[in-house]
Image (cartoon, rainbow, N blue to C red):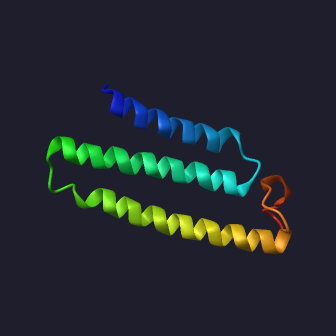
Amino acid sequence: MTPAHFTFSSAFVLGLAGLAFHRTHLLSALLCLEGMMLSLFIAMSLWTLQLDATAFSPSPMLLLAFSACEASAGLALLVATARTHGTDRLQSLNLLQC
């Protein structure tokens, strides 16, 4: 495993660990998801550059577009949650209550 692959795989694992273990605020969960998507984007970009595969060249841009959509939906949920509940703490949210 090259140092670049190790760096991006460890960045993905750190984002996953942060998402799994540090779930106090919705904003921190969204930041962990964005870190994971950024490491996937850079890893896919390096992968297509190393393989010289022109067929896979639109894949990183498609992933970046989906990550932008995910970020906008997450921020919309964050604003809606902060307006209705007054906080973004995940422990104060009750999923069974409408």
Q: Is residue 9 left or right of residue 86?
A: left
64, above or below 52, in the image = below
Locate residue 5: give its quadrant: top left
Residue 23 in the image, given as x and y percentages of width and height? 72, 46
Q: Is residue 2 left or right of residue 81?
A: left
4, above or below 66, in the image = above
**Observer able to see residue 32:** yes
11, above or below 33, in the image = above
Q: Quadrant of the C terminus?
A: bottom right
> Which residue is at 83% across, 53% downward?
91
Q: Is residue 47 left or right of residue 67?
A: left
Locate residue 78: give its quadrant: bottom right
> Which residue is at 29% across, 49% downward?
45
Residue 74 in the image, given as x and y percentages of width and height? 61, 65
Q: Is residue 94 left or right of residue 42?
A: right
> Which residue is at 73% across, 74% downward?
80
Between 31 and 91, the one lying in front of the other is 31
Residue 14 in the image, given as x and y percentages of width and height? 55, 36
Looking at this view, name the residue that lies furthest to the top.
Answer: 1
Residue 51 in the image, given as x and y percentages of width and height? 17, 42
Between 20 and 67, the one lying in front of the other is 67
